[in-house]
């Protein structure tokens, strides 16, 4: 699903990654849980393989030609209206982003070996909107406040406390803290969700899919990005190929949190 944030990510990566036109995709794995892409530089990016009824039977038009292709060409798939292609594109964006992030270029700071949820200061009277059912976050948030609202797009995720995504329109603008799963970048809802989050004290975008350069998101008042860096690519790609997810490839990555080191008010978008 095309969006301004994705388009800005692509432009920034093309501008900032050294010799980007020489970089190619060396391997791609599209699994049941995650999609992974490894570049000719050795860098790896992942993206949640959206598995709802909309794309469970979708074919990838570029199948058989992705490996060996210029990475910018594959990253452009993030603009596709076909979710299956967008997943591959975001995985490529995340792989390219690792080249920038490891150089620590930009006005942001890293907190290494850190879990996003542990870096958010939640007060007892805070209202927290969790957009996307990030299961491990729920008990942590509930231990700090009773006012947690979980909204989920995937109809297969059920629970008495899980609300449909349509509830975002009412709940997110009133929340003190908004936590958004990285899959919102893939399905094209992130731009609108950040507009709804303007009143929040803290806005976090988290998960393996959120492992990208944060500039376009910080510009829209995101205060925290929680992603992963792959440290064992071979094991990760094997797990993805065999249909696994985060529980199976947990030992293949390190978590990190990125925060802006300064806020340039002239660069913030007033949507």
Image (cartoon, grey):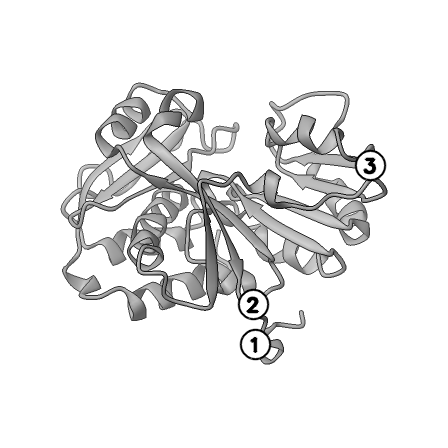
Residue at label 2? 219
**At which x and y percent is residue 234?**
21, 29
Which secondary structure, mark 1?
A: helix
Viewer-proximal residue among 253 and 44: 253
Which residue shows up at 56% across the image and 67% down it? Answer: 219
Which secondary structure, mark 2?
A: loop
Say few, some or many: other residues with alpha carbon within 10 Å of mark 3 (under 14 / 14 to 19 / 20 or more): some
**At which x and y percent is residue 242?**
30, 19
Residue at label 3? 147
What is the CA distance from the residue labelled 3 to the residue labelled 2? Answer: 28 Å
Which secondary structure, mark 3?
A: loop
Quarter in which the C terminus is drawn: bottom right
Q: Is residue 80 visible?
A: yes
Say few, some or many: other residues with alpha carbon within 10 Å of mark 1 (under 14 / 14 to 19 / 20 or more): few
Residue at label 1? 267
Viewer-proximal residue among 43 and 59: 43
Residue 36 sits in which quadrant?
top left
**At which x and y percent is residue 238?**
25, 24
Q: Are marks 2 and 1 in contact (CB under 8 Å)?
A: yes
Looking at marks 1 and 3 on the same chain, the residue that comes earlier in the sequence is marked by 3
């Amino acid at each position: 699903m095309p969006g301004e944030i994705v388009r800005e990510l692509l432009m920034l990566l093309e501008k900032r990654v050294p010799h980007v036109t020489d970089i190619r995709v060396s391997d791609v794995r599209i699994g049941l849980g995650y999609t992974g892409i490894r570049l000719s530089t050795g860098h790896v990016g992942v993206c949640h393989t959206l598995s709802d009824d909309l794309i469970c039977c979708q074919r990838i038009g570029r199948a058989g030609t992705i490996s060996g292709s210029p990475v910018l060409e594959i990253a452009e798939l993030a603009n596709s209206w076909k979710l299956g292609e967008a997943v591959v594109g975001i995985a490529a964006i995340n792989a390219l982003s690792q080249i920038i992030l490891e150089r620590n270029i930009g006005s942001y700071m890293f907190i290494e070996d850190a879990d996003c949820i542990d870096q958010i200061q939640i007060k007892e009277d805070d209202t927290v909107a969790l957009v996307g059912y990030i299961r491990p976050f729920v008990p942590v948030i509930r231990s700090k406040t009773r006012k947690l609202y979980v909204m989920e797009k995937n109809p297969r995720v059920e629970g008495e406390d899980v609300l449909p995504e349509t509830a975002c329109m009412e709940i997110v603008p009133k929340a003190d803290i908004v936590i958004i799963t990285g899959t919102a970048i893939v399905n094209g809802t992130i731009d609108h969700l950040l507009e709804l989050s303007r009143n929040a004290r803290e806005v976090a975008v988290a998960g393996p899919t959120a492992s990208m350069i944060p500039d376009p998101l910080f510009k829209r008042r995101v205060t925290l990005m929680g992603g992963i860096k792959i440290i064992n690519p071979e094991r990760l790609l094997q797990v993805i190929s065999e249909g696994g997810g985060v529980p199976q490839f947990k030992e293949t990555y390190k978590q990190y949190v990125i925060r802006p080191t300064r806020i340039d008010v002239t660069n913030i978008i007033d949507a």
